[in-house]
Amino acid sequence: MPDSPRRRGALASVLLALLGLTAACGDRSPGGTTLTVYADSSLTEVFGEMETAYEHAVPDVDVRFVFGASTEMAGRLSDLSPADVLVTADAAAMNEADEYLGGRRRTVAHNSMTIAVAPGNPLRVRGLADLARPGLRTAAGSAAAPAGRYAAELLRNAGLQNLRWTSVEVGARAVLDRVRAGDADTGIVFLTDMRSAGVAASSVPIPADANVVTSYPAAAVEGGGQEKAANAFISWLTGRTARALFHKHGFPVPDAPQ
């Protein structure tokens, strides 16, 4: 059957629709770059603000964040999941993905730990020593997670090496969820995590002489063709705007760009 003008017009409409769909699935602007950043979940809120700030400063880059436990994010690189930047909550988690990373690692922020308890602290937990109280249910990160490694260091500082956690979780946010749900009486979490809890949990401070200073290293992922843009983003994370946003969300920053 020979083509009719109506048939040719319909085909043209379909082609135009397909071209529009293809364009919608690509970069958000002509010649633009999409950066995928794998980051520890404790950075969820601050990186949410940084996404807007960076895309305003560099309009041709679309930053997309994927959040999770540091070990999970590092492990995804071994599955060849697409990512351009990795930001973890300690150096050990970063080392797990070392073969996939390139360029210089930079410490972009610091943190510390605190004890999460039920709202109002009904069990009157006063410090680390109370975690050894019989019957108290305490959650912490697993030994393979940054939160777990930091929690173990806290116990050593307090002379509580023989204490055993009631439950171990994949990361600090999962620990906080346990406390918020009432499945744990206390939990060792990042200090900044408490902001996400709102009124659903309270915090018992850990004195500075027993606490730990945590670090967030960032590195570019090799092999994706975005190393230049990835390193530019990491450099921005050490600059004035990013440092101000880290401070706003309670993260200390290095004394000078690393």
Image (cartoon, rainbow, N blue to C red):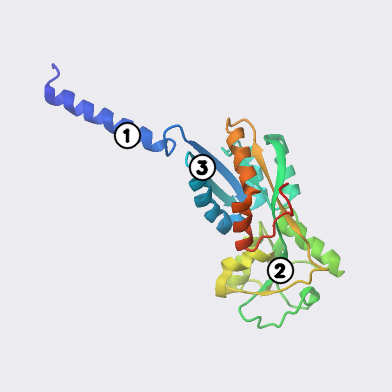
Q: Which mark is residue 128?
A: none
Instruction: Give the label on residue 58, or none.
Output: 3
Q: Residues within 10 Å of mark 1 (few under 14, many from 20)?
A: few
Q: How many marks?
A: 3
Residue at x-position 61% and y-position 39%: 232
Indicate which disc, 1 or 3, sits on the residue closer to the N terminus. Answer: 1
Mark yes or no: residue 160 visible: no
**Which residue carries the number 1 mark?**
20
Rendered view: 34 above or below 123: above
Q: Name the residue at 85% across, 64% down.
A: 156
Q: Quadrant of residue 94?
A: top right
Q: Which residue in the structure is indicated by mark 2?
A: 114
User: Residue 155, can we see it?
Assistant: yes
Q: Are marks 1 and 2 in contact (CB under 8 Å)?
A: no
Question: Label 2 crowding class (10 Å Cα cut-off): few <14, some 14-19, many 20+?
Answer: many
Q: Position of residue 26 (x, y in %)?
A: 42, 35
Tell me which amino acid carries mark 2: Thr
Label located before the other in sequence (1 or 2):
1
Give the residue displayed 48% in from the left and 47% down from the top: 56
Task: For mark 1, give the secondary structure.
Answer: helix
Looking at the rendered structure, the kind of residue marked 3 is Val
Q: Is residue 206 above or below residue 149?
A: below
As measured in the structure, the alpha-carbon distance from the residue carrying label 1 to the one carrying label 2 is 50 Å
Q: Choose between 53 and 107: the one closer to the eye.
A: 53
Mark 1 to mark 3 CA distance (whole Å): 25 Å
Choose mark 1 or mark 3, whichever is in front: 3
Of the two numbered discs 3 and 2 on the same chain, state the one appearing first in sequence: 3
Q: Secondary structure at mark 3?
A: loop
Amino acid on which disc 1 is placed = Gly
